[in-house]
Amino acid sequence: MNLINRWWGKLIRFGFRLLYYEMAWSYDLVSWLVSLGEWRRWQLSSLTFLPNQPSSTKKTLLELGHGPGHMISEVVKRGYRAVGIDLSPFMGRLAQARIDQEGLGNAAAVVRTAIPALPFQSQSFDCVLSQFPTPYILEPATAAAIFRVLKPGGRLIVLPEGHLTGRSILHRAIAWLFWITGQSVATTNTARTIDEVWQPWKNHFQTAGFAVEINTVNHPRSVCTVMIAKKPEKATSNY
């Protein structure tokens, strides 16, 4: 059984690698299909938790894993200056093409880098955004890097999951697909509260020095989870 699990894990990782690298061009279509069109709605839900934008200055935002660049475009249109990072050169080209096509100019940029080696000065960003992250988000080095680049009072916004609420055969098939690929969290288990399900995430970021809250956002056909981790005005990282 352990051998089967190891090979299955390798197969899943290979599939995700293809989606983010050589087959990055198919990312939007795949995400739309597996969510029955809800993917973008889930992504936009996290942006409702952005800090208020003062009229005098533009706030700065760092997106971890920018993908095709949709959220970079969205936050710039909302008055932010945005920088996205991603290890995939394929996603980098897609995001840069979007920035150029939409004329976002100096308000947006993409950088190819790993999170522990973020090439930014300390306290550079008002907000850090991460949507549907892989397990890197729970690594101590990730929390420490985010804490370092956030300004005092800044916030990390994470969209870890979204799921359909329908009970049709198609909805159940998609839920099964998310489960077998390790992308599903048991938020629909009525025996556990939302706080209980996400307690490991809360513990992780609280240990790093953040104040953490978990939010659920309801849509007509789905529900998504948004975690907000705030850096105190006067804070020292625990890592």
Image (tube, rainbow, N blue to C red):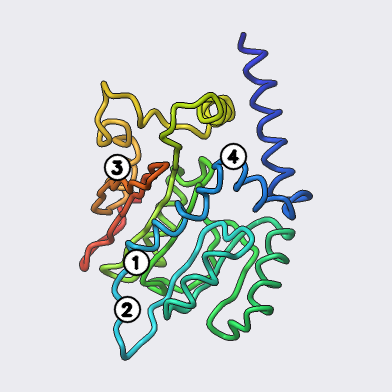
Residue 185 vertical placement versus 78 (above, below): above
In 3D space, how far apart are the residues under numbered discs 3 and 2 (Cα atoms)?
A: 26 Å
Q: Secondary structure at mark 2?
A: loop
Q: Secondary structure at mark 1?
A: loop
In front of the other: label 1 or label 4? 4
Residue in view at x 69 percent, y 59 percent = 91
Q: Do the CB atoms of the residues marked 1 and 2 lie less than 8 Å apart?
A: yes
User: Crowdedness of circle 1 by 10 Å Cα count: few (<14), some, many (20+)?
Assistant: many
- Between 2 and 116, the one lying in front of the other is 2
Q: Which residue is mark 3?
A: 202
Question: x and y percent of residue 14 in the render?
Answer: 72, 35
Question: x and y percent of residue 105 in the render?
Answer: 60, 85
Question: Could you tell which of marks 4 and 3 lies nearer the N-terminus?
Answer: 4
Residue 53, which numbered label? 2
In 3D space, how far apart are the residues under numbered discs 4 and 2 (Cα atoms)?
A: 33 Å
Q: Which residue is mark 1?
A: 50
Give the image quarter of residue 12. top right
Question: Could you tell which of marks 3 and 2 lies nearer the N-terminus?
Answer: 2
User: Crowdedness of circle 4 by 10 Å Cα count: few (<14), some, many (20+)?
Assistant: some
Give the image quarter of residue 104. bottom right
Residue in view at x 61 percent, y 12 percent = 2
Q: Secondary structure at mark 4?
A: helix
User: What amino acid is at disc 2?
Assistant: Gln
Residue 126 lies left or right of residue 181; in this view the side is left
User: What amino acid is at disc 4?
Assistant: Val
Residue 139 vertical placement versus 156 (above, below): above
Q: Which residue is mark 4?
A: 34
